[in-house]
Image (cartoon, rainbow, N blue to C red):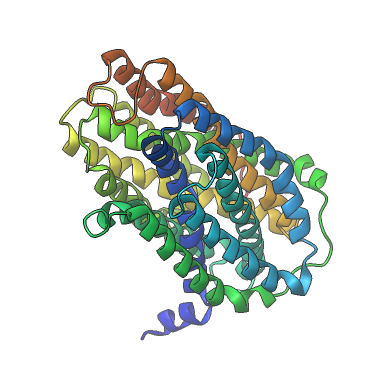
């Protein structure tokens, strides 16, 4: 093993990658799979599921800042709190996918996904806050840590995306097996990260208004909100688009893997490029490439799987830049104005989840209104056209707004 490799292992950055993989496995794939799973298996309408998801995000408006406040005051109890909440995360996943609803499917969906995302928020806030202290003790600082962390997160998304599809050939209940496997890996990840929570954390909590008063922190939060919404849109509609617009049922898993694997592979490359030309120029290049990728989706129709596969690779690669560089920029700013990081990443978590809520509450009812039915053999053409416009044109418009915001933002390189 080389000296560089030994140094990286001694920094325990692989533990950060594994923990990030578990968090990502409880994040985006749940918004991709859960609505379709409950619509197909329990007959819950897309509009009802969207209403539940949006209601939970309104709850997050209060919950996430409170979790950030708690995080900054845990002290030595952080390790035990994280361990307990890690178990809650695994159990909530099992309840969501592996347990037949003992009560109304809508209520059960709301209860289990509340437990899942409350645990997800708490763990994410503590994880990224601890990263501020970690980055100060390693070579390469925030960008190097972000590359390890976000690469692990993206690989976790890849595994979570493809696992149910692969398990369909070996199990009658692929989502149940996935949920149980996820719970087991979550326990391993929590154990691997346990030594990290004893790291030094600043004692003075930061008021949330201090963060919101900071012009750069506020601008980065707004930029994250606008720039992440296209990913939320494409994630929410991905399964519907592949199954109905491309008429390619069974290809959802492989195409998702292509998308997120491209993001994972590109992540360290974007980090290296940002070290050479700066984060702002790198992000702008990635945003332009994203717009071009989404634009090529507009003319696609039944049978265009291979063209869409290429688009998945290029658009996925742009996500690698978003998920690596923006959190690193925000963490760098938090290190300057809020060393604890709990309140700051409470806001960051809220912004990330709000984009998914926005996508669900706008897109799913719109599809319902257009006459789209999940799993239907023959959706009307106007419903399929609505699906295409929502999947491709909306992200293009949002990316243009994100470019304008980024151009107007002076970043600390």
In the figure, 319 relative to 363: above or below? Answer: below
* Residue sticking out furthest to the front: 102
In the image, residue 207 lies at what x, y percent?
A: 83, 50
Residue 413 in sight from this viewpoint = no
Q: In terms of depth relative to the viewer, which is nearer, 280 or 197?
A: 197
Residue at 66% across, 52% down? 345
In the image, residue 208 lies at what x, y percent?
A: 79, 47
Residue 248 in sight from this viewpoint = yes
In the image, residue 256 lies at what x, y percent?
A: 31, 46
Q: In terms of depth relative to the viewer, which is nearer, 2 or 204?
A: 204
Res 376 quadrant in image: top left
Left or right: where does residue 402 sit relative to residue 255?
A: right
State the count of labels.
0
Quadrant for the N terminus, please.
bottom left
Q: In terms of depth relative to the viewer, which is nearer, 387 or 342?
A: 387
Left or right: where does residue 348 sit relative to residue 276?
A: right
In the image, residue 378 lies at what x, y percent?
A: 23, 21
Residue at 29% across, 23% down? 298
Residue at 52% across, 48% down? 102
In the figure, 34 relative to 25: above or below? Answer: above
* Residue sticking out furthest to the top: 382
Left or right: where does residue 214 sit relative to residue 21?
A: right
Residue at 32% across, 26% down? 295
In the figure, 363 relative to 352: above or below? Answer: above
Q: In terms of depth relative to the viewer, which is nearer, 113 or 204?
A: 113
């Amino acid at each position: 093993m080389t000296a560089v490799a030994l140094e990286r292992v001694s920094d325990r950055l692989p533990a950060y990658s594994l923990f990030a993989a578990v968090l990502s496995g409880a994040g985006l794939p749940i918004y991709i799979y859960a609505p379709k799973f409950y619509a197909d298996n329990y007959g819950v309408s897309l509009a009802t599921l969207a209403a539940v998801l949006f209601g939970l995000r309104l709850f997050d408006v209060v919950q996430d800042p409170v979790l950030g406040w708690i995080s900054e005051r845990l002290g030595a109890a952080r390790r035990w709190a994280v361990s307990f909440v890690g178990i809650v995360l695994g159990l909530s996943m099992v309840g969501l996918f592996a347990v037949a609803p003992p009560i109304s499917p809508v209520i059960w969906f709301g209860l289990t996904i509340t437990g899942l995302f409350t645990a997800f928020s708490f763990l994410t806030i503590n994880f990224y806050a601890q990263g501020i202290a970690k980055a100060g003790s390693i070579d390469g600082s925030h960008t190097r840590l972000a590359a390890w962390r976000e690469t692990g997160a993206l690989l976790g998304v890849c595994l979570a995306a493809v696992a149910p599809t692969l398990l369909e050939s070996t199990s009658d209940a692929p989502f149940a097996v996935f949920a149980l496997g996820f719970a087991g890996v979550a326990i391993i990840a929590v154990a691997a990260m346990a030594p990290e929570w004893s790291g030094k954390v600043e004692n003075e909590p930061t008021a949330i208004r201090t963060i919101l008063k900071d012009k750069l922190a506020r601008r980065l939060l707004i930029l994250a909100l606008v720039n992440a919404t296209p990913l939320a849109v494409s994630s929410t509609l991905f399964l519907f688009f592949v199954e109905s617009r491309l008429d390619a049922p069974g290809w959802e898993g492989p195409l998702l893997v292509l998308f997120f694997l491209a993001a994972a592979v590109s992540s360290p490359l974007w980090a290296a490029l940002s070290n050479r030309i700066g984060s702002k120029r790198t992000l702008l290049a990635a945003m332009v490439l994203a717009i071009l990728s989404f634009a090529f989706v507009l003319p696609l129709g039944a049978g265009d799987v291979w063209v869409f596969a290429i688009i998945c690779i290029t658009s996925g690669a742009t996500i690698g830049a978003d998920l690596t560089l923006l959190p690193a920029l925000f963490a760098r700013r938090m290190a300057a104005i809020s060393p604890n990081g709990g309140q700051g990443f409470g806001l960051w978590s809220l912004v990330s989840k709000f984009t998914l809520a926005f996508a669900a509450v706008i897109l799913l009812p719109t599809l319902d209104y257009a006459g789209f039915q999940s799993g239907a053999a023959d959706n009307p053409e106007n419903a399929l056209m609505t699906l295409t416009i929502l999947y491709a044109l909306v992200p293009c418009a949002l990316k243009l707004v994100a470019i304008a915001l980024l151009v107007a933002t002076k970043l600390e390189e």
